[in-house]
Each structure stands twice: as structure tokens, then as C-alpha cells.
Image (cartoon, rainbow, N blue to C red):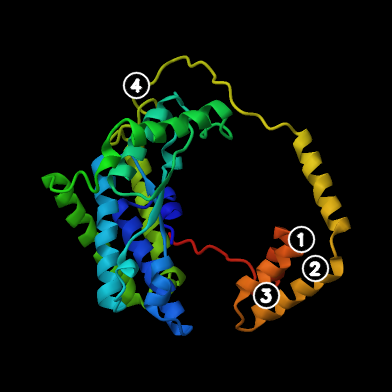
Amino acid sequence: ISGYHMREAGCTAAQELGFTMANAIAYCEAALKAGLEFDQFAPRLSFFFVSYNNFLEEVAKFRAARKLWAHIARDRFGAKDPRSMMVRFHSQTGGSTLTAQQPINNAIRTAIQALAAVLGGTQSLHTNSWDEALALPSEESVQLALRTQQIIAYESGVADVIDPLAGSYLVEYLTAKLEDQAKEYIEKIDGMGGAVAAIEQGYIQKEIQEASYQYIREIETQQRTIVGVNRFQVKEEISPRIFRVDRSWEERLKARLVDVRRTRDNHEVARCLRDLEQGARGSANLMPLIVDAVDHYATLGEVCDTLRGVFGEMRELLVI
């Protein structure tokens, strides 16, 4: 259950929490409606959060997420299994925080964000590479991103204990504050009829748009400092060596796709896609049908085209 892309689109930490938990509630209600027991599927749920630059706020956000979900699972859904109340989450450092100006500074941003995620209790972590604002990452920058994680894990000592910032007055205050703010969003979304209704009404999109606009305005007016962007600029910068894709790879991949389509059993592929279409038009579990299609070498595009033919394409509701 991901809050990552909402945060990257511009929402605040409290919105990331509130909207993610509201989405999680909607998923769980759909599973219950389908006849599953909460403790049957909840231990397998996982979350995906981003880690941004406000170090202590991000640590508190992850801590607040665990409190929020534990209460939601127990009080709203009647969880009995302790695993159903756990927030297992993956985190990724903030892609939208990477700057094209003075890009090597991004290595420092990534290190701070990664440390916040670890102190907040993440189970797994993706560290962005410093040159991703410019291109796909180079092998050297990817290795540095990996070494950032390894130094935190093996040299810093912060991973040796659980919740090392617990008891800090400021961290506990921020945790409670973010939890309360997220609860307000959840209650408002509940009042609209849930996350799906809130999205259909454009509420969540509007909140993210306004938060994103406010963030950009703060940068433009220098109420918020972004090093190298609106303060501490340099007149001349050395252009870094960035990764460039060998265009011959495109031809090799296209040739491999042609060969797969030539050698696979196209009658079986057609059958799988027909079964998938029929399942999509009914109420069947689509996952086994998708796996069957892929096992027979149906391509991602063919699977998506089949589903697109039934469900159409989402058109984003923009609210000004």
C-alpha cells in the first residue's frame, strides 16, 4: 500500500500518512467484502513510504504510521493476530528532492533520508543515486548509493537497537502531532464514503495539488531553502559524467521480442488472453489468469491491452 507516489507528487508528511491509511482501509474493506477474514490477509500487507529531507519529521512519520495502523487494525477491523497490526514497510529516498544543480549534493540528501528511514524502523530501503535528476544512474553512483546503506547498517550503530529515538521529547511530540493530523484526514475521507469516493470527488488530488503549489511557492520566495537551487548557487559547474544508453540495445531487445512472438505457442497465448478478457468482464480473480498468460509468454503490452479493452483508461480528475 503505497504513499510514495503521493508524496513525490507534493503532499505533506501528514497527508502521506492519512491518504495511505485511507487507501489501506479501502483495500481491506474490499477484501472483507470478497469474503476474506481480516487476520487471513492482513499479516501479508506491506506499506511503501518515501523518506524526505526533514529528518526528525520523517522519523516521526514512520513511528506514527505504526501507531495508526495498529489502532486501525485492532479497533476498526477487530484484528486478533499481532502480525495483522504490524506495519511492515519499504521506504525509498525522495526522488523529487534530487536537484540538477550541484548534483553531487544529492548524495548528502540521500544519506540523510536513508538514516531517517532506518531510525524510523524501515524493513527495506532503496537509496537513490545522486545523478538521477540528470539521467539513469551510472554504475559508480549506484555503488555509492549502496555504500550509503552499508555504512549506515554496519558502521553507524543505529541499526543495533529498535526505535533508538524513542523517548526524545521532540520526536515523541512530532509523532503524536502527525498521528493526529493523519487521523483528521482519515475521518474526513470516511465522511466522504471512503478513499474511492474521495478520489472520485477530487478531494485527495486537490489536497496534493495545493500542498505541492505551496511547497514550490516557498522555494520561489526563499521561505524554504534548497541548497544550490535558490541559495548557495555557483556560477560555473563542472558537468558530471552521466550514463548514456547504447541505442543498439533497443534493436537487440526489439529483435528478442520478435523472436519470442515467433517461437511461442500463439494459439495458447490467444486462449489465455481470451480467458483474461472474460474474467475481467466478470468477477473472477484475475491474478491466476494473468500468471497463466505470462507463463505462455504473453507480453506486458498484450496483457494491459486486454484489460484496457474491458476497463478503459483512467483519466485523472484535476481540481483547481
Residue 105, labelled with which disc?
none
Placement of 132 over or under 193, stated as above or below: above
Q: Which residue is mark 4?
A: 232
Separation of disc 2 and disc 1 at Cα? 7 Å
Residue beneath the point at 38% across and 42% down:
216
The amino acid beneath tag 1 is: Tyr
Amino acid type of the residue tagged 4 in the rendering: Phe
Mark 2 lies on residue: 269
Q: Nearer the viewer, residue 155 or 53?
A: 155
The residue that disc 3 covers is: 310
User: How far, Cα to Cα, is label 3 from label 4?
Assistant: 53 Å
Task: Compare marks 2 and 1 and give the one earlier in the sequence.
Answer: 2
Mark toward the start of the polypeptide (3 vs 4): 4
**Could you tell which of marks 4 and 1 lies nearer the N-terminus?**
4
Question: What secondary structure is found at the residue carrying circle 3?
Answer: helix
Q: Are marks 3 and 4 in contact (CB under 8 Å)?
A: no
| Residue beneath disc 1 | 297
Tell which circle, 1 or 3, labels the residue nearer the N-terminal end.
1
Tell me where residue 109 sits by quadrant. Answer: top left
Callout 2 amino acid: Val
Nearest to the eye among marks 1 and 3: give it: 1
What is the secondary structure assignment of the residue under circle 1? loop
